[in-house]
Image (cartoon, helix red, strand yellow):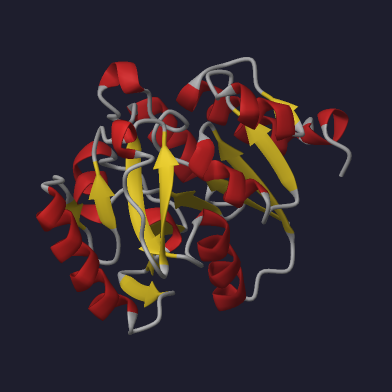
């Protein structure tokens, strides 16, 4: 049994298309889910996913960079309650510094803020970067942690395959059995992947799903 855990931005959906998921990719994933679990592990909030990924029905969503999971319309949070008091203190600090931000259900987003990378110092919180965007969250939260908690939640015992493209997928890769990079992934992601696909974004993911369904995956990854 395989479980596929896929990033969303620049993995399932392309930046060139405004991160709107193509109908072909949605259909491919929805058909795959009939046989194997498929979870989307993303830094995004669900309110944006609802707009961008219409028609996509994965087994579950692991949202806000691993902060919580959404499955069968139920939310499962992976953060300690004291985070929300700490978050208020961080928000006050950002306000004092004049830094623009938005707030999800758990994390704080810094859009196009890579120029602030060496200017924000936080206690008991971390900033994880996804190219130019930053996400402030508890120090222990990341995509890998969220996936690990989700696997425990569903008592999954099979093999896991992670697909990604960027820095915040490194922790996802650390918590899966096999690591796959789409063709448009950053070099640092390709360097640690077990398999680098020859197609970008959703086309690459679709190809991987076909490889799993046909058994071709066994020829390219030592499983």
In which quadrant is the N terminus drawn?
A: bottom right
Q: Is residue 133 left or right of residue 140?
A: left
- Determine the residue positioned at 53% across, 31% down: 165
Give the quadrant of residue 82: bottom left
Q: Count the numbered circles shown.
A: 0
Q: Position of residue 191 (x, y in %)?
A: 71, 27
Q: Quadrant of the C terminus?
A: top right
For residue 179, above or below residue 188: below
Where does the image place residue 4, in percent across and percent down from the top left? 60, 48
At x 10% / y 47%, what residue is drawn?
98
Rendering coords of residue 142 (x, y %): 49, 58
Asked whether 22 or 178 is in front, the reply is 178
Left or right: where does residue 217 sit relative to residue 35?
A: right
Q: Is 154 drawn above or below residue 117 in the view shown?
A: below
Q: On the rendered structure, is 51 left or right of 44?
A: left
Residue at horizontal 37 percent and vertical 49 percent from the top: 43
From the viewer's side, name the closer residue of 204 and 7.
7
The image shows residue 131, relative to residue 16, as above or below, that is below
Q: Residue at x 57, y 74 (%)?
A: 154
Q: Quadrant of residue 206?
A: top right
Q: Is residue 11 above or below residue 49?
A: above
Q: Position of residue 95 (x, y in %)?
A: 11, 56
Left or right placement of residue 211 versus residue 92 in this view: right
């Amino acid at each position: 049994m395989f479980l596929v855990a896929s990033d969303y931005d620049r993995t399932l959906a392309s930046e060139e298309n405004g991160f709107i998921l193509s109908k072909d990719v949605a259909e491919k994933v929805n058909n795959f889910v009939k046989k194997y679990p498929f979870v989307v592990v993303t830094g995004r909030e669900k309110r944006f996913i609802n707009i961008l990924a219409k028609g996509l029905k994965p087994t579950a969503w692991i949202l806000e960079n691993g902060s919580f999971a959404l499955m069968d319309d139920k939310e499962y949070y992976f953060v300690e309650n004291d985070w929300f008091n700490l978050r208020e203190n961080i928000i006050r600090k950002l306000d004092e510094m004049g830094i623009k931000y938005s707030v999800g259900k758990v994390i704080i987003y810094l859009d196009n803020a890579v120029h602030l990378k060496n200017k924000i110092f936080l206690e008991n919180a971390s900033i994880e970067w996804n190219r130019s965007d930053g996400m402030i969250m508890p120090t222990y939260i990341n995509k890998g942690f969220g996936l690990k908690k989700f696997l425990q939640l569903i008592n999954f015992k099979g093999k896991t395959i992670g697909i990604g493209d960027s820095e915040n997928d490194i922790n996802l890769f650390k918590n899966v059995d096999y690591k796959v990079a789409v063709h448009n992934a950053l070099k640092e992601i390709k360097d640690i992947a077990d398999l680098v696909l020859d197609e970008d974004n959703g086309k690459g993911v679709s190809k991987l799903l076909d490889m799993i369904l046909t058994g071709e995956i066994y020829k390219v990854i030592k499983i």
